[in-house]
Image (tube, grey):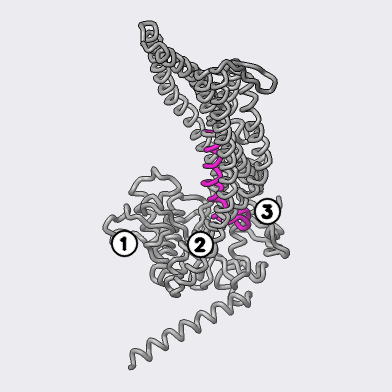
């Protein structure tokens, strides 16, 4: 753990706090070892007082001196405990925060495909359970290690000096505890790993059920979901119980050994006190010694001090096993190669215009087996408004995603303003393009902050301007809080059309040279769609705009249209010319006309009736 490459730098960053905390904790441990001697001295003083049936001035002075020292030591221990808690736990919480921050930055840099194979629930488990487990080990683990090593060493040294024979007697079960811990550690680590995986499953199922709650209710499947959830929860319960059972067996075993040791000290020590009081000489392991009542009290006090380090040793083994497993999971995540990153010779595009060129471009998804796009050759002039149409699965979204570098593409195949996008810095590329995806994701925040997501300091005037561009301003004005209305998680309080238009406003407000709308007006009525398209023509004049659509009516008045068919460009021309040169486009036009005729006929029949 301490040598882990991801934790090492944070240990060094907070080393001064950890060192201060450990020094103070060590000082408190030392002060604790003084108290048993005081306890033995007071016992001896009162024993002598009973024997002479008097409590003279010398005895009173001894008791007052010991009481004063004890009070001062207690005050010092109280202040010291406050300081080491602040120092050590401040460091552990700081390391937790920095590690989680590093993980979040890593999560942002990983490609989309990573989240196709690793569920959100699993990733959230790393960010919560696993990071918290590591923080617990750094905080309380440090405390327990210092106590287990430093306090136990101090106590053993004091005991050896005080009575070697009794110390050897105590050492036997302590060695058994260490051996027992070493045997259990690996097994406990495996059980904890299984427990964390079951937590991942529980996170996944819970997230999916809550996200799809409206669908569950719509199909009246609450009981079925509850039953399915109970099975996942039962599996998680069994994994947790198995870990707790092993931990408790381990902990109880240590407690039994320590309790047995205490009983042995009291029984054998009492016998030695009796033997010494009657003129005998105790003998243990070939060592002869005298053993009075004060010696028994002192040894019991030392024994009481060493119980906590031994219990701490058991807890360290458990905590270390858990944190090691959790750190392995996090390390695997942080070790994941960052496929989408800047090339060594990447550049910023100065004064981008928005020209796009595809040259012999083909694409296959990293996990795919066939080419989704084949031999794409296109030149989109800067300032053009381009439509992209085609059947479902024809490659429309894949084509525009290539511009965003959601996936890596081959070099010298896709260019923006004559620069290979693989040679453009990612920040520069993302500042050139604004994108409205099919899945219109809104954050649980105000509508104003959702629209101004690209720059939260954007003025309200600009936010309102973007809302007017997307024809959502009137809808927002109808809300009681207007632009301060909370959208709810994923925009749950808004209609599909409202979410689409807010997403368009969020992209428009950035005023980038290239704007891509992927089927982004499918949920709005025809009149609103026409207004948005008119706004695009007027407000984005001189800027490149690409509209992906499944409706021909959306793109019929654009400059040119790309017709996709089975991953290839069937045609790229003006709407007027496409009808005669593209079978796919012609078929889409005719089907839409037929659909419009059916709707018109139904309206006429209703009107006649």
Marks 1 and 3, how far apart in space? 42 Å
Q: Nearer the viewer, mark 3 or mark 2?
A: 2
Q: Is residue 279 magenta?
A: no
Residue at the extreme left: 480
Up the image or down, 603 lies above or below 127; here it is below
| Residue picked out by circle 1 | 474
Up the image or down, 174 lies above or below 544; here it is above
- Whether residue 559 appears in this view of the structure is no
| Residue picked out by circle 3 | 409
What element does badge 2 sit on?
helix
Task: Give the residues drawn in magenta, as a range.
Answer: 113-139
Q: Nearer the viewer, mark 1 or mark 2?
A: 2
First of labels 1, 3 by sequence position: 3
Which is more toward the observer, 4 or 372? 4
| Residue picked out by circle 2 | 208
Marks 3 and 2, how far apart in space? 32 Å
Quadrant in the picture for the C terminus: bottom left
Residue 126 placement (x, y as % from top left): 56, 47
Marks 1 and 2, how far apart in space? 33 Å
Q: Quadrant of residue 164?
A: top right
What element does badge 3 sit on?
loop
Which is more toward the observer, 437 or 243? 243
Q: Residue at x 38, y 86 (%)?
A: 603
Marks 2 and 3: in contact by CB < 8 Å? no
Residue at the extreme bottom: 609
Residue 340 placement (x, y as % from top left): 64, 48
First of labels 3, 2 by sequence position: 2
Which is more toward the observer, 422 or 106? 106
What element does badge 1 sit on?
helix
């Amino acid at each position: 753990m301490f040598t882990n490459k991801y934790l090492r730098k944070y240990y060094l960053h907070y080393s001064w706090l950890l060192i201060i905390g450990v020094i103070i904790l060590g000082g408190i441990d030392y002060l604790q070892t003084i108290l048993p001697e005081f306890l033995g001295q007071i016992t001896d003083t009162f024993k002598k007082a009973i024997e002479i049936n008097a409590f003279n001035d010398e005895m009173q002075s001894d008791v007052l001196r010991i009481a004063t020292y004890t009070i001062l030591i207690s005050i010092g221990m109280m202040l010291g405990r406050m300081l080491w808690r602040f120092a050590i736990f401040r460091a552990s919480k700081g390391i937790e925060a920095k590690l989680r921050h590093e993980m979040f930055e890593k999560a942002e840099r990983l490609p989309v495909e990573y989240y196709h194979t690793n569920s959100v629930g699993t990733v959230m488990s790393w960010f919560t359970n696993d990071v918290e487990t590591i923080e617990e080990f750094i905080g309380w683990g440090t405390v327990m290690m210092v106590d287990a090593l430093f306090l136990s060493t101090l106590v053993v040294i004091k005991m050896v000096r005080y009575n070697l024979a009794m110390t050897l007697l105590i050492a036997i079960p302590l060695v058994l505890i260490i051996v027992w811990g070493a045997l259990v550690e690996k097994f406990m680590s495996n059980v904890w790993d299984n427990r964390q995986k079951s937590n991942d499953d529980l996170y996944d199922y819970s997230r999916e059920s809550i996200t799809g709650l409206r669908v569950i209710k719509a199909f009246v499947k609450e009981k079925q979901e509850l039953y399915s959830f109970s099975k996942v929860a039962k599996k998680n319960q069994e994994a947790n119980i198995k870990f707790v059972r092993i931990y408790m067996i381990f902990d109880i075993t240590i407690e039994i050994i320590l309790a047995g040791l205490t009983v042995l000290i009291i029984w054998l020590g009492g016998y030695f006190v009796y033997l010494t009081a009657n003129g005998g000489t105790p003998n243990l392991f070939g060592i002869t010694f005298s053993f009075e009542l004060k010696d028994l009290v002192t040894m019991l006090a030392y024994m009481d001090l060493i119980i906590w380090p031994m219990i701490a040793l058991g807890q360290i083994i458990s905590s270390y096993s858990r944190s090691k497993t959790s750190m392995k999971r996090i390390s695997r995540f942080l070790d994941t190669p960052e496929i989408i990153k800047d090339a060594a010779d990447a550049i910023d595009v100065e004064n981008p215009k928005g020209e796009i060129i595809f040259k012999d471009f083909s694409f296959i998804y990293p996990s795919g087996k066939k080419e989704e796009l084949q031999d794409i050759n296109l030149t989109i002039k800067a300032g053009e408004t381009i439509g992209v149409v085609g059947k479902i699965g024809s490659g429309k979204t894949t084509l525009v995603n290539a511009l965003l570098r959601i996936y890596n593409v081959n070099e010298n195949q896709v260019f923006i303003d004559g620069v290979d996008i693989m040679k453009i810095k990612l920040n520069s590329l993302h500042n050139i393009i604004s994108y409205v995806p099919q899945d219109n994701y809104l954050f649980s925040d105000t509508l104003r902050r959702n629209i101004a997501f690209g720059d939260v300091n954007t003025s309200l005037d600009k936010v309102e301007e973007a809302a007017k561009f997307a024809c959502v301003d009137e809808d927002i004005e109808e809300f009681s809080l207007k632009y301060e209305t909370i959208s709810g998680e994923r925009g749950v309080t808004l209609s599909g059309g409202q979410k689409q238009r807010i997403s368009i406003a969020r992209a428009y407000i950035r005023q980038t040279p290239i704007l891509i709308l992927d089927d982004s007006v499918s949920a709005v009525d025809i009149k609103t769609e026409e207004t948005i398209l008119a706004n695009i023509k007027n407000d984005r004049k001189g800027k490149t705009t690409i509209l992906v659509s499944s409706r021909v009516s959306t793109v019929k008045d654009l400059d040119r249209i790309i017709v996709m068919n089975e991953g290839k460009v069937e045609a790229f021309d003006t709407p007027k010319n496409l009808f005669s040169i593209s079978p796919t486009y012609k078929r889409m036009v005719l089907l839409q006309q037929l659909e419009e005729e059916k709707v018109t006929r139904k309206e006429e029949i209703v009107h006649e009736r």
